[in-house]
Image: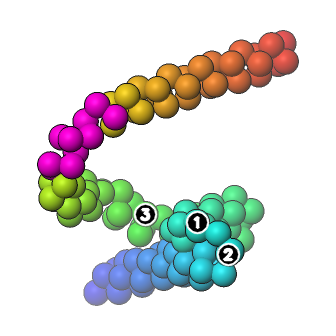
Amino acid sequence: MYKIITAFAHYIIAFTLIYLCLYSGNIIAGLLPFTFPGSIIGMLILFLLLAFNIIPDTSVQPGCELLIRYMTLLFIPISVGVMLYYDTLINQFGAIVASTLISSFITLVVIGYFANWIYRHET
């Protein structure tokens, strides 16, 4: 019984820390004069807290493992929502494919040049 209560407490602490970072990011995003996703700011806050060892990684590990284990289930509502816009996606298919290919090519070229620059300066 003690193990179950301890495991439950670890999950509660992990999710509390994760949600505190999320809500802090949402509050900061609301205060900014420009639009920026609060969830991204929350992830950055969590990253900084973990990177500077302000909170130990073991405190959020149970919650993160649980979320990652069931991540595929979290995409089901989004996928169903995308199906509602099937007609729009079909009408804009060419533009979507073109923008995806162009942005992927630009990303590949920039990363290639950056990696070449790093490799040249490293030796």
Q: Residue 61 placed where, x, y %?
A: 48, 64
Residue at 28%, 87% (x, y): give it. Answer: 1
State which tag comes first along the sequence, 3 or 1: 1
Check contact, mark 3 vs mark 2: CB within 8 A.
Answer: no
Query: Please, what is the three-letter code of the amino acid marked with disc 3?
Result: Cys
Residue 33 located left or right of residue 23: right
Q: Residue 103: x and y, percent?
A: 49, 31
**Label 1 sits on residue:** 36
Q: Secondary structure at mark 1?
A: loop
Image location (x, y in percent) of residue 38: 54, 71
Q: Where is 6 relative to 58, above or below?
A: below
- Cα separation, mark 3 vs mark 1, equals 24 Å
Q: Tell me the kind of residue under disc 1.
A: Phe
Element on which disc 3 rests: helix
Residue type for callout 2? Leu
Residue furthest to the front in view is 91
Q: Which residues are magenta?
A: 86-95
Residue carrying label 3: 64
| Residue 55 quadrant | bottom right
Q: Disc 2 on helix, strand or loop?
A: loop
CB of mark 1 within 8 Å of CB of mark 2? yes
Residue in view at x 60 percent, y 80 percent: 30
Give how far apart the Cα atoms at labels 1 and 2 are. Answer: 8 Å
Q: In the rendered image, is residue 49 in sight?
A: yes
Q: Nearer the viewer, mark 3 or mark 1?
A: 1
- According to the picture, the residue beneath numbered tag 2 turns out to be 32
> How many numbered badges does the structure rendering display?
3
